[in-house]
Amino acid sequence: MGRYYRLTKKISDEMAQEILKELQELENVKSVGFSEDLSLLKVETKNGLFPEVMNRAVNICRRIGGGCDLSFAGFVC
């Protein structure tokens, strides 16, 4: 099962691609992707290791997205 996270500010396509690239390199990430309008990040982890993955994801989004934060938006059904 995955989770959706809402981005607190608009990011560019280039930023989104760089964020995805770095997130996909994380050890416990199963899959990641953005919604079409880049307002939501969908994250699936291996063995439900969300705390480890999301700690890194927040840092990556802040760095690449110019201070963009993430907030939990719901579960993927």
Image: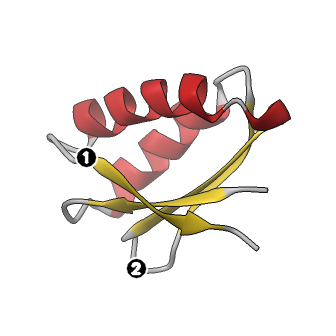
Q: Nearer the viewer, residue 63 or 57?
A: 57
> Comparing marks 1 and 2, which lies closer to the viewer?
1
Q: Residues within 10 Å of mark 2 (few under 14, many from 20)?
A: few
Instruction: Please state, as top left, top right, bottom left or bottom right, where the N terminus lies in the image.
Output: bottom right
Query: Which image quadrant for residue 18?
Result: top left
> Going 37% across and 35% down the picture, which residue do you hit?
58
* Residue 74 image position (x, y, % from top left): 54, 67
Residue 54 position (above or below residue 15)? above
Q: Does residue 21 appear left or right of residue 67 in this picture? A: right
In the picture, the disc for residue 6 is none
> Which residue matches tag 1?
69
Q: Position of residue 42 (x, y in %)?
A: 59, 59
* Rendered position, 18 above or below 3: above
Label 1 Cα crowd, 10 Å radius (few <14 / some 14-19 / many 20+): some
Residue occupying the point 74% across, 26% down: 28
Asked which colour scheme the image uses, the reply is secondary structure
> Residue 30: x, y in percent?
79, 41
**Hey, what amino acid is under mark 1?**
Asp
Left or right? Give the position of 19 relative to 42: left
- The disc, 1 or 2, on the residue closer to the chain's N-terminal end is 2
Above or below, 44 against 21 in this view is below
Q: Secondary structure at mark 1?
A: loop
Indicate the amino acid at tag 2. Answer: Asp
Is label 2 in a helix, a strand or a loop?
loop
Up/down of 62 relative to 56, above or below? below
| Residue 46, percent from left and from top | 82, 34
7 or 75, nearer to the observer: 75
Label 1, label 2: how many angstroms apart (C-alpha)? Answer: 16 Å
- Left or right: 65 in relation to 42: left
Q: Residue furthest bottom?
A: 37
Q: Which residue is mark 2?
A: 37
